Amino acid sequence: MSIKCFLKMKNKEKIAMITAYDYISAKIAEAAGIDMILVGDSASNVMLGNSDTIKIGMDEMLIFIKAVKMGAPNTFVVGDMPFLSYQISESEAIKNAGLILKAGADAVKLEGGKNVAPLIRKMVEYGIPVMGHIGFTPQSYKQIGISSKGKTKTEEDLLIESAVALDDAGAFSLVLEMVTEPVAKKITESISIPTIGIGAGRFCDGQVLVWHDFLGLNRDFEPKFLKKYLNGFDLFKKAIENYSKEVKDGTFPSIKNVFKPIDIESSDQK
Ligand SMILES: Nc1nc(=O)c2c([nH]1)NC[C@@H]1CN(c3ccc(C(=O)N[C@@H](CCC(=O)O)C(=O)O)cc3)CN21
Ligand SMILES: CC(C)C(=O)C(=O)O
Ligand SMILES: [Mg+2]
């Protein structure tokens, strides 16, 4: 899978993307044949227990990105640029994007509309593949709130203007997060690059969900756009309860799990 491949998939085959943050999860994702893995700054929430994505930095993101590329060497991996890694200056943004690529990512993703288009243009000029991210942009939730975008004509116009600007700046793909379905459809039809939706309805070129969310590990997170494909939390919980019970009642370890000393008698028989 390559950028060329994703561009060709537009209007032909939907792109299936999930997040992952560690070696074994990435291995499972690659074995399942997922099209793209995002190492999201949602790691702040699901890996580190923070309440938002403001609280994660480059140091932490690079560890997750390295682990994921080790587990999925043959899958296209996108590394999310954390808050303040691209906002301060163009040079800091390019340096941090470079560190994400050095860690093994095949592309970076950053949040923002037409305001970040000049930065993305520069990054692309220097050979850094960039995925855009508009609509609800979690790194700005303290300013814009947690809600779907594209509900008014003003919001719709701004979103379309941004999508076109990012396409024009050279982004290879665009995440649409919590964008109303008709606006997401309009954007998808207005730009040449594939749109990847999360809470953006049925007409995007692809979809992305967070590992812990769609596997049902993140028990209390139930946004409208989420579908849970596994009851992960309860399955893990039951297995742990079973293990604990077996340790306490002496069922585990059994004879199958123990190491034995060399049998003196049988070795003497020689
Ligand atoms: N585990 C996890 N999954 C995510 O999808 C995710 C993260 N973390 N962290 C970063 C952002 C934050 N995201 C969020 C956070 C909250 C809602 C939420 O509360 N949604 C409600 C209200 C929407 C509304 O009122 O318009 C919903 O019902 O969808 C959605 C996405 C998406 N991203
Ligand atoms: C929700 C996706 C698009 C994301 O940015 C993340 O997981 O950080
Ligand atoms: Mg993110």
Image: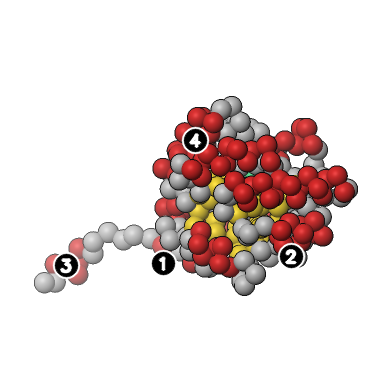
State yes or no: discs 4 and 2 in contact (Cβ < 8 Å): no
Q: CA distance from mark 3 to mark 2?
A: 71 Å
Residue 249 visible, this orientation: no
Residue 45's x, y, as percent?
65, 42
Mark 2 or 1, nearer chain start: 2
In this view, the residue in front, 244 or 116, is 116
Residue 59's x, y, as percent?
50, 34
Q: CA distance from mark 4 to mark 1?
A: 55 Å
Residue type at mark 1: give it.
Lys
Q: CA distance from mark 4 to mark 3?
A: 67 Å
Q: Picture quarter containing residue 89? A: top right
Please name the colour scheme applied to the rendered image: secondary structure
Q: Picture quarter containing residue 269? A: bottom left
Q: CA distance from mark 1 to mark 3?
A: 22 Å
Question: Badge 4 is on which residue?
Answer: 94
Q: Picture quarter containing residue 260? A: bottom left
Mark 4 or 1, nearer chain start: 4
Question: Badge 2 is on which residue?
Answer: 203
Question: Badge 1 is on which residue?
Answer: 256
Mark 3 or 2, nearer chain start: 2
Question: Badge 3 is on which residue?
Answer: 267
Residue 147's x, y, as percent?
82, 45
Residue 161's x, y, as percent?
74, 47
Residue at horizontal 59%, vertical 27%?
88
Residue type at mark 2: give it.
Phe
